[in-house]
Amino acid sequence: MYAPSAARNVAPIVAAMRGHVPNTGCALEIASGTGEHVVAYAAAFPGVVWQPTDIQVDRLISIDAWRAEAGVANMRMAQFLDASRANWDAGRFDLVTVVNLLHLISDADARHVIQGVARSLRPGGRWVLYGPFRTGGAFRSDGDVAFDNNLRRHDPAIGYKDLEWVEAEAQAVGLSRAALIEMPANNLMLVMQRTP
């Protein structure tokens, strides 16, 4: 599977992640999608073992196909994980990445993702979150308004989350901001760290 948006944003995401990814350890990617991002992470950060996950079987197959084509040795086979359900726990990781997910799920499901991320991080571990957000209750561009309206037409329960809401939910489960990075196309990368 191929996603044009992944091809466009993978290089800036990898560049922004530098300095926030440990030299060694294990990383969990939630909602890996086609697998294009995690293959790039594995190549860029070879000291880290990457565990991709998704909820759709066709995507799990695609992730493993990208893994095989790239020949990366530090990437595990894709695993099923529904991070939107309550009380999930994937084990303990040094890093968790989530790209372009929160605006596609409800507030309740996003809260479950955040809580599960906190459970799955080792003390001092980091969560790298990328995507579009509202800030200060406002959209960051007219394009964001249009995109959010389109999402909510299909499902009124989903849509852009306020960055401040995400941070508050993360802080409530022991995560604190390590960095906030402006990204292309009005996206943001929020890096949160679990209390050591």
Image: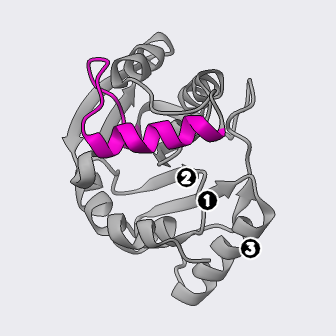
Q: CA distance from mark 1 to mark 3?
A: 11 Å
Q: CA distance from mark 2 to mark 1?
A: 5 Å
User: Residue 112, image x and y in percent?
Assistant: 64, 25
Quadrant housing residue 79? bottom right
Is 155 part of what is drawn in magenta?
A: no
**Label 1 sits on what residue type?**
Pro
Q: Secondary structure at mark 3?
A: helix
**Label 3 sits on what residue type?**
Ile
Write the start and end of the magenta stretch as one range. 127-154
**Label 2 sits on what residue type?**
Glu
Residue located beneath label 3 in the image = 61
Q: Earlier in the sequence, mark 2 or mark 1?
A: 2
- Residue 166 appears anywhere in the view: yes
Quadrant housing residue 153? top right
Residue located beneath label 2 in the image = 29
Residue plotted at (34% across, 70% down): 8
Q: Secondary structure at mark 2?
A: strand
Q: Residues within 10 Å of mark 1 (few under 14, many from 20)?
A: many
Q: Which mark is residue 52?
A: 1
Residue plotted at (74% across, 73% down): 61
- Residue 129 appears anywhere in the view: no
Compared with residue 45, is residue 144 higher up or lower down, i.e. above or below? above
Foreground residue, 33 or 39?
33
Q: Residues within 10 Å of mark 2 (few under 14, many from 20)?
A: many
